[in-house]
Image (tube, rainbow, N blue to C red):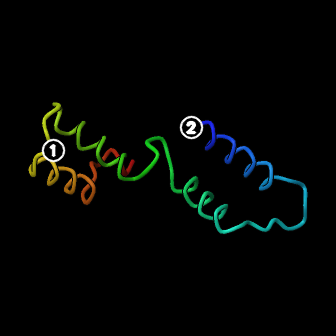
Amino acid sequence: MAEFELQVRHFGKKLFAETEKVILTEKEQELFAYICNSGTYVTMKNRVVRKLSQLQGDETPIRTRTKWNYYRERLFPPMEWFQ
């Protein structure tokens, strides 16, 4: 964890340095893509798993019915979502 924090800190300093052009290595480009694609739950997979757990409401393995409810909610969001 500490190593990752150091990598991100170094990357941030390089990215926001006051230079005209920033050239990123391949590893830095991968880190940038990872950071841009991450959110509150780190990855989309974690976000979906958390939402499925919320829909199911218990700690048992996710059932097929819960998955169908998730798909339906994603395809047809409630009217409140549009307002």
Q: Position of residue 48 (x, y in %)?
A: 31, 49
Amino acid marked by disc 1: Ile
Q: Which mark is residue 1?
A: 2
Q: Counting other residues with Cα less than 10 Å from the Cα at mark 2, is it few (<14), some (14-19), or many (20 or more)?
A: few
User: Which disc number belongs to residue 27?
Assistant: none
In percent of width and height, residue 8 lies at: 67, 47
The residue drawn where x is 59% and y is 63% is: 30
Query: What residue lies at 62% left-to-right and 36% top-to-bottom?
Result: 2
Q: Nearer the viewer, residue 64 or 82?
A: 64
Task: Tell me the kind of residue under disc 2.
Answer: Met
Question: Upstream in the sequence, badge 2 or badge 1?
Answer: 2
Q: CA separation, marks 2 and 1?
A: 30 Å
Label 2, secondary structure: give it: loop
Q: Which residue is mark 1?
A: 62
The number of discs equals 2
Q: Nearer the viewer, mark 2 or mark 1?
A: 2
x and y, in percent, of residue 1 in the image: 56, 37
Residue closest to the eye, 50 or 27:
27
Percent of width and height locating residue 78: 27, 48
Q: Is residue 57 above or below residue 8?
A: above
For residue 27, above or below residue 64: below
User: In the rendered image, which quarter is residue 51 located in?
Assistant: top left
Q: Name the residue rendered at 48%, 41% in the picture.
A: 40
Q: Residue at x 9, y 49 (%)?
A: 65
Q: Secondary structure at mark 1?
A: loop
